[in-house]
């Protein structure tokens, strides 16, 4: 089954045609990466799939069902987004951020169980539970952002620049975590500027340039592709 | 004399705080000063007045009716006057202008239908007094202060402990992410206006009993606005602290200095805070939001 199917997606911001007819499937259990330079339209695709940005054309289907019209209903389709720059609820404690991630859950025991699952991935969060999330280090904030998304027990996880601004050691932790999350049966769609590392752990990858996919292929093959350099240098 | 003045100040301050809470709640979520809040307080007072005089309800029922009435009016106000602006992502200045329009509209609606007469509530508490430390204090003043304190504490617990309360604070941080967590923002904003309206209803009844009920009584919310700024717009403990400080300072100025200078003093305080400490005493540090 397709976890996600994007068909001829178009997004306009006023007169700017940010995403121009992008199509791709994500099969269940896959890790798929979209790489490309700043402003190529990567984040826009993510926000469109999350239901925040309204496409001007095309269709998005999550688990073979059409997108709901309201952003708050998307989480119930089993999709969660870790946005660029994390966007935590910075005035809220770590615990409250996690509780918000499971907002749709009425069952406290399930919420506790999900929280326990996050602590398995990131033990440090347990120690930080009562701390205000805005005071965490960058790496810890990213761990919390991923955990907050996992709290809704998604079938597909969207990660927008999960390693942006992180120290190399933490980047590796994040990449390893993504692999572990996939092992637990979650499908991952990722957008990265850290192209090589992202593609190496991906089943498939797409290179995007000025709102269009210019190349696709198995992740590790694409990682060594000269077009990668071209896409980043705006060749 | 000192204790009496203090209690009078605290009771007025308590009412200011009840009003300031409504301002602060809406400001923190939608980032605009809801100047229609005063009109909601005024309508809440009229609802209470109608229940007390037409239906001869007792104080408890009058208060409950006014809370419900003002709460519903506040929600309707949001649905009719602000939600379409929100949907179009209008700048918050537009919302503020719309709020001012609502205030004028509602006031004139009352002029046109009920009229400009001043009404008094029936004497619920008569001139009952409680004696404390050798001073006789008005039961209404003591009651208003304690009620305001309890209600705001209750609201604080709601906001900090419950799932809905956490969602409101999450919305204050980041509305878009809040909706991605599965929060229906329209519903959340309605809840915020319901809460602000409920507190407006309490304030309206206390104001009406202490003074009189008339179409422009809502303009006393100028003082609530000052209280909210002193405490820090957007902060609930700040609204309480700001309201009490302003009430006590005002009462002492009018008792010991001059009652004519009272408002001069209050508004000077507002300007001083806006210039030197715009975040107020307990306001959210705006650096945090960067």
Image (cartoon, grey):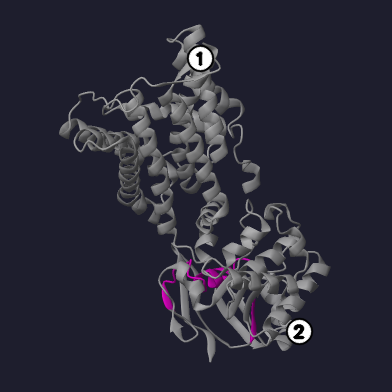
Q: Which residue is mark 2?
A: A224
Q: Quadrant of residue A201?
A: bottom right
Residue B246: say if magenta.
no
Residue A87 occupies which quadrant of the picture?
bottom right
x and y percentages locating residue B213 in the rendered image: 28, 27
Which residue is most to the bottom?
Answer: A1
Residue B7 left/right relative to A137? left
**Can you say which quadrant of the picture contains the C terminus of chain A?**
bottom right
Disc 2 vs disc 1: Cβ atoms closer than 8 Å?
A: no
The chain letter under disc 2 is A
**Residues packed near mark 2 inside 10 Å, few (<14), some (14 to 19) or many (20 plus):** few
Instruction: Tally the marks.
Output: 2
Q: Is residue B88 visible in the rendered structure shown here? A: no
Residue indicated by mark 1: B135
Residue A197 vs B164, above or below: the answer is below
What is the residue that sits farthest to the top in this orientation? Answer: B257
Question: From where the camera sits, is residue B96 visible?
Answer: yes
The secondary element bearing badge 1 is classed as strand
Q: Which residues are magenta?
A: A30-58
Which residue is located at x 39 percent, y 53 percent? B190
> Mark 2 against mark 1, which lies toward the viewer?
1
Q: Is residue A32 highlighted in magenta?
A: yes
């Amino acid at each position: 089954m397709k976890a996600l199917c994007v068909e001829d997606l178009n997004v306009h911001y006023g007169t700017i045609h940010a995403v121009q007819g992008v199509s791709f499937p994500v099969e269940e259990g896959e890790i798929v990466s979209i790489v490309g330079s700043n402003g190529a339209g990567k984040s826009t695709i993510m926000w469109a799939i999350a239901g925040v940005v309204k496409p001007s054309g095309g269709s998005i289907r999550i688990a073979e069902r059409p997108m709901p019209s309201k952003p708050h209903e998307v989480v119930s389709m089993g999709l969660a987004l870790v946005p660029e720059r994390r966007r935590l609820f910075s005035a809220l404690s770590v615990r409250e951020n996690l509780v918000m991630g499971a907002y749709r859950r009425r069952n406290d025991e399930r919420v506790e169980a999900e929280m326990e699952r996050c602590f398995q991935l990131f033990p440090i969060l347990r120690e930080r539970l009562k701390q205000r999330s805005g005071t965490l280090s960058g790496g810890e904030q990213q761990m919390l952002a991923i955990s907050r998304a996992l709290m809704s027990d998604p079938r597909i996880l969207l990660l927008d620049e999960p390693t942006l601004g992180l120290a190399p050691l933490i980047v590796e932790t994040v990449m390893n975590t993504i692999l572990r999350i996939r092992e637990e049966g979650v499908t991952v769609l990722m957008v990265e500027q850290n192209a090589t590392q992202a593609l190496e752990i991906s089943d498939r990858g797409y290179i995007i340039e000025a709102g269009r996919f210019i190349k696709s292929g198995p992740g590790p093959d694409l990682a060594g592709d000269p077009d990668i350099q071209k896409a980043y240098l705006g060749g | 004399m000192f204790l009496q003045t203090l209690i009078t100040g605290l009771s007025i301050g308590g009412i200011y705080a009840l009003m300031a809470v409504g301002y602060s709640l809406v400001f923190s979520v939608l980032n605009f000063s809801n100047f229609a809040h005063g009109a909601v307080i005024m309508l809440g007072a009229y609802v209470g007045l109608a229940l007390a005089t037409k239906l001869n309800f007792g104080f408890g029922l009058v208060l409950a009716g006014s809370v419900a009435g003002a709460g519903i009016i506040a929600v309707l106000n949001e649905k009719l006057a602000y939600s379409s602006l929100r949907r179009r992502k209008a700048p918050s200045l537009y919302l503020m202008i719309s709020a001012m329009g609502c205030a004028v509209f509602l006031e004139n609606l009352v002029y046109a239908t009920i009229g400009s007469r001043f009404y008094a509530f029936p004497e619920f508490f008569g001139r009952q007094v409680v004696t404390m430390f050798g001073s006789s204090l008005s039961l209404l003043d003591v009651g208003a202060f304690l009620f305001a304190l309890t209600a705001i504490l209750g609201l604080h617990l709601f906001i900090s402990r419950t799932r809905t309360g956490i969602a409101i604070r999450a919305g204050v941080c980041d509305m878009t992410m809040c909706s991605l967590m599965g929060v229906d923002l329209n519903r959340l904003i309605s809840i915020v206006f319901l809460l602000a309206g409920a507190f407006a209803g309490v304030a309206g009844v206390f104001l009406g009993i202490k003074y009189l009920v008339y179409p422009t009584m809502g303009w006393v919310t100028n003082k609530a606005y000052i209280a909210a700024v002193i405490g820090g717009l957007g902060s609930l403990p700040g609204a309480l602290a700001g309201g009490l400080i302003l009430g006590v300072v005002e009462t002492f100025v009018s008792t010991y200095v001059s009652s004519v200078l009272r408002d001069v003093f209050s508004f000077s305080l507002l300007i001083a805070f806006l210039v030197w400490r715009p975040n107020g005493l307990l306001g959210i540090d705006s650096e945090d939001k960067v």
